[in-house]
């Protein structure tokens, strides 16, 4: 994996990596001082994950809540470019009316149950796989699903960093 050129100013670093975690520039800000020149995407992802895992439950919940609904708000401008591309790549913009209705019903049920949107690192999955996972995860208990969602957020960040390292 290609190492990142870490000879970036603080502002340039935040500009490049601030959206790796959805609407959470604080993660990039937290790792700026500790990142070593030439670190790989995997190393940077690990540094970021450590900061997120060390955050309070309230900060982690805010991070989860910053994520968009899957197949729900795809047309809204509040989606980051990363989220738009990821959801389109999984075919979530091409749901049948029945799939869209089920996604919307599950989104509502999930949000009511857990207090944050369903998060799934969609890259490499088809919308039917995602829907199957959604049906299963909506039955989890609060603690299990909180950790599962956080793990998915970390996977999304790693995939985004890997994509940037190849750009």
Image (tube, rainbow, N blue to C red):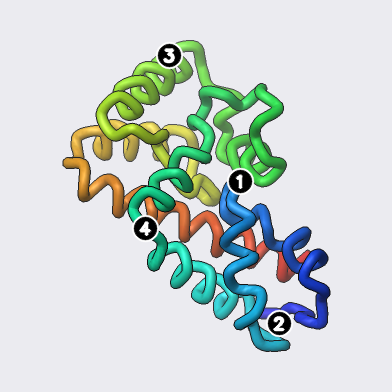
Crowdedness of circle 4 by 10 Å Cα count: few (<14), some, many (20+)? few
Quadrant housing residue 83: top right
Quadrant location of the N terminus in the rendered image: bottom right
Label 1 sits on residue: 23
Earlier along the polypeptide chain: callout 1 or callout 4? Answer: 1
Label 3 sits on residue: 101
Mark 1 secondary-structure assignment: loop
**Pair 1/4: label in front:** 4
Earlier along the polypeptide chain: callout 3 or callout 4? Answer: 4
Q: Residue furthest bottom?
A: 37
**Residue 11 or residue 101, whichever sits in front:** 11
**Pair 3/2: label in front:** 2
Question: Which residue is pictured at 61% across the width and 82% down the height?
Answer: 34
Crowdedness of circle 2 by 10 Å Cα count: few (<14), some, many (20+)? some
Q: CA distance from mark 2 to mark 4?
A: 30 Å
**Pair 2/1: label in front:** 1
Earlier along the polypeptide chain: callout 2 or callout 4? Answer: 2
Question: Which residue is pictured at 33% across the width and 39% down the height?
Answer: 133
Earlier along the polypeptide chain: callout 3 or callout 1? Answer: 1
Question: Which residue is pictured at 59% across the width and 75% down the height?
Answer: 44
Q: Are marks 2 and 4 in contact (CB under 8 Å)?
A: no
Question: Which residue is pictured at 71% across the width and 27% down the height?
Answer: 77
């Amino acid at each position: 994996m290609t190492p990142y050129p870490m000879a970036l100013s603080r502002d340039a670093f935040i500009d490049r990596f601030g959206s790796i975690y959805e609407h959470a520039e604080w993660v990039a800000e937290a790792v700026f001082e500790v990142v070593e020149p030439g670190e790989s995407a995997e190393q940077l992802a690990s540094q970021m994950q450590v900061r997120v895992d060390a955050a309070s439950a309230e900060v982690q919940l805010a991070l989860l809540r910053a994520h968009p609904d899957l197949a729900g708000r795809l047309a809204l401008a509040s989606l980051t470019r990363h989220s738009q591309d990821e959801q389109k790549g999984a075919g979530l913009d091409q749901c049948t009316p029945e799939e869209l209705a089920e996604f919307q019903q599950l989104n509502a049920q999930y949000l009511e149950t857990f207090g944050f949107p369903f998060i799934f690192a969609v890259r490499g999955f088809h919308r039917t796989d995602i829907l199957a996972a959604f049906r299963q995860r909506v039955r989890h208990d609060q603690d299990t699903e909180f950790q599962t969602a956080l793990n998915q957020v970390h996977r999304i960040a790693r995939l985004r960093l890997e994509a940037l390292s190849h750009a």
